[in-house]
Image (spheres, rainbow, N blue to C red):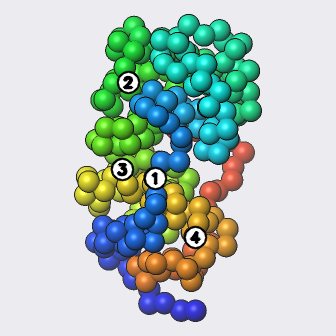
Amino acid sequence: MATKRISRKEAKARAHETLMRLRKQHPDAHCELVHRDAFELLVATVLSAQTTDVAVNKATPALFKKYPTAQALAKAETSDVESLISTIGMYRQKTKNILGLARKLIAEHGGHVPSTLDALVALPGVGRKTANVVLGVIFGQPEGVVVDTHVQRISQRLGWTSSTEPADIEKNLCSILPREDWDIASHTIIFHGRRICSARKPQCDKCSVNDACPSAFNAEHVGRKVRSTSATPKHG
């Protein structure tokens, strides 16, 4: 199946329109980390680093039942928390992070999750990516677009960026998408990546924007991670 190729320049100019079309294809796109409030989302997002949302959602009900607030978690024993999240990758380091952030929330924010990027990234285990998840989902005020592996891959395929580093990709996306799109953009693209535009064997024939994608019907060769012997940097 063939489709008319468009230039990367044209793809960037049509970015908002393309995103809105993807929204129609995935109207249920949302943050899939189960949470009831800002504290639970913050902790769940920290736990989700290099781990699937599914794995996190299996572990957090017991964690939040025992430690439903920052005040409760701040008093927890390390061994107790480790046992509750031991099914999650890097659970020992993540235990240290969530205990540290809970204690810092108590010491500096009255137990409440702050609503600014600077305050969030000052918490243990919280990087720009995690902060923007919380800022977007809870407060509706993200300071950028959350870039995970799906967003990185699909942004490259759509011609929205040629960068390979998450920080640079985020800057590119923020420059071509209006600020009001920043939060929903990541959720929509993640759903599209999981359902249609997978890393291997993307289903271009089922994609609602294949006419606006410079990589359509050749997408498997674009946006794939390059394997190297060096460690991949983490982005919280």
Relative height, residue 85 to residue 52 (above, below) = above
Q: Residue at x 35, y 43 (%)?
A: 136
Residue 88 at what x, y percent from top left?
70, 33
* Amino acid identity at mark 2: Val
| Quadrant containing the N terminus in the rendered view | bottom right
Front position in the image: 17 or 44: 44
Q: Earlier in the sequence, mark 3 or mark 2?
A: 2
Q: Which residue is mark 2?
A: 113
Contact, mark 4 vs mark 1 (Cβ under 8 Å): no
Residue 213 at what x, y percent from top left?
45, 77
Q: Secondary structure at mark 1?
A: loop
Contact, mark 3 vs mark 2 (Cβ under 8 Å): no
Look at discs 2 and 4 and give the one toward the viewer: 2
Q: Which residue is mark 3?
A: 183
Front position in the image: 21 or 197: 21
Q: Which residue is mark 1?
A: 30
Mark 4 and mark 1: span between their CA atoms? 16 Å
Q: Secondary structure at mark 4?
A: loop
* Amino acid identity at mark 1: His
Q: Earlier in the sequence, mark 3 or mark 4?
A: 3
Mark 2 and mark 4: span between their CA atoms? 35 Å
Local crowd at mark 4 within 10 Å, few (<14), some, or many (≥20)?
Answer: some
